[in-house]
Image (cartoon, rainbow, N blue to C red):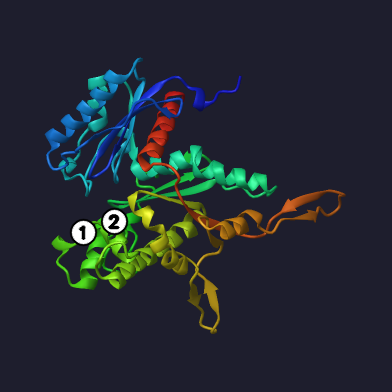
Amino acid sequence: MEYSIDKDQRIVMTLDAGGTNFVFSAIQGNKQIITPIRLYPNSEDLNKCLETIISGFEIVKKELKEAPVAISFAFPGPADYPNGIIGDLPNLPAFRGGVALGPMLEHHFEIPVFINNDGNLFAYGEALFGFLPEINKNLEEVNSSKRFKNLIGVTLGTGFGVGLVANNQLITGDNSNGGEAWLLRDVLSPDYHAEEHISREGIRRSFAKKTNIPLSDVGMPQEIHDIAIGKLEGDKQAAIATYNDFGTALGEALSIIITLFDGIVILGGGVSGAYDLFAPAMFEQMESNFKLHDGNSLHRLVPRVFNLEDAISKSRLLEGQQKELEIPGTNKKIAYDPFLRTGVGISKNSTSNIIGLGAYAFAINKLDE
């Protein structure tokens, strides 16, 4: 009988460790088996933060009917993940200098511990169980020979998280720094990195500058979103311009990643809910042109980019330009689709849930190596 991870009965405890919330859960056979537990991270105080992590997993463990076989979870930012050592993370300052978090948890719970970047596990979950199999199923349904094997997973929230998956394998890099796209240059503010605009604080800073309001008086991105759509009173044009800037910065960052990695893009995280506001500027940037010295222009990207949240645009990506070519010297033909294309879509999954599924699959695969 063929093995399926969906039917695996082993239990893995998981954690989505964001800068504002720690979300603990447990997964068995790719399904959450408890109600997620949210705890404040105490990210400014190392001892309190470590106590929070241990207590969160202890709470999860008490709810389980069977013993877990591993712990697998996500942390935001670069670290020595293979050795479980968390270093200098901007959103979790208590860990500066290096903390052997994985070995500590292995000692306490006496089971293997696997830690990854949150963007990596988001991408891994979407590649195995979410967006990638769905789009490839859609391609199969229209009898297209096209299949996507590379996925760029992006989380838009506290920061700009990116994970890269090629042929169901995470691309983590030699220094566990694969996909650290937040360190790309901000196209609108070249002296800063991409999170100057592509982050919750970036949205707030941008709106503050456009309205001359002190940053301390600016609400959260959801409020700025509601001003932009006319749901709340405020400077609507400034709010719209703020999300346009967000989209432009994101579009340029994605263009660089696609040029180097050549994959399809899935967006998740809280700020992805403002897709309708930032997507037009994002696609405009991705579909822009370079000038050439002979007066002609060159497309910013080799593949055409499609909005997968628009039915007509998605249909165009699925259809492609399928045809058959004769194989010289034979009476055979081969399917050929010369239309180079990619797309950007929004995750239909809870970010924490899909990160948890990615963490589960990563742990199970590591245990079986």
Residue at 50% x, 44% y is 131
Residue 74 place in picture, x, y as percent: 32, 38
The circle on residue 125 is: none
Whole-Å distance between the Cαs marked 1 and 2? 8 Å
Assess disc 2: are there few (<14), some (14-19) or many (≥20) residues with their C-alpha within 10 Å of its C-alpha: some
Residue 4 place in picture, x, y as percent: 54, 25
Instruction: Look at the image and tell me whether residue 360 can be seen.
Output: yes
Residue 354 place in picture, x, y as percent: 41, 39
Instruction: Look at the image and tell me whether residue 189 can be seen.
Output: no
Query: Would you say the residues marked 1 and 2 are in contact, meaning their CB atoms lie under 8 Å apart?
Result: yes
Residue occupied by mark 2: 222
Quarter the N terminus occupies: top right
Residue occupied by mark 1: 219
Residue at 62% x, 53% y is 318
Residue at 51% x, 52% y is 263
**Quadrant of res 233:** bottom left
Under tag 2, what secondary structure? helix
Q: Amino acid at mark 1?
A: Gly
Residue extending farthest to the bottom is 295
Q: Nearer the viewer, residue 95 or 57?
A: 57
Residue at 17% x, 35% y is 49
Q: Is residue 151 above or below residue 55?
A: below
Q: Is residue 53 left or right of residue 343?
A: left
Q: Amino acid at mark 2?
A: Gln
Under tag 1, what secondary structure? loop
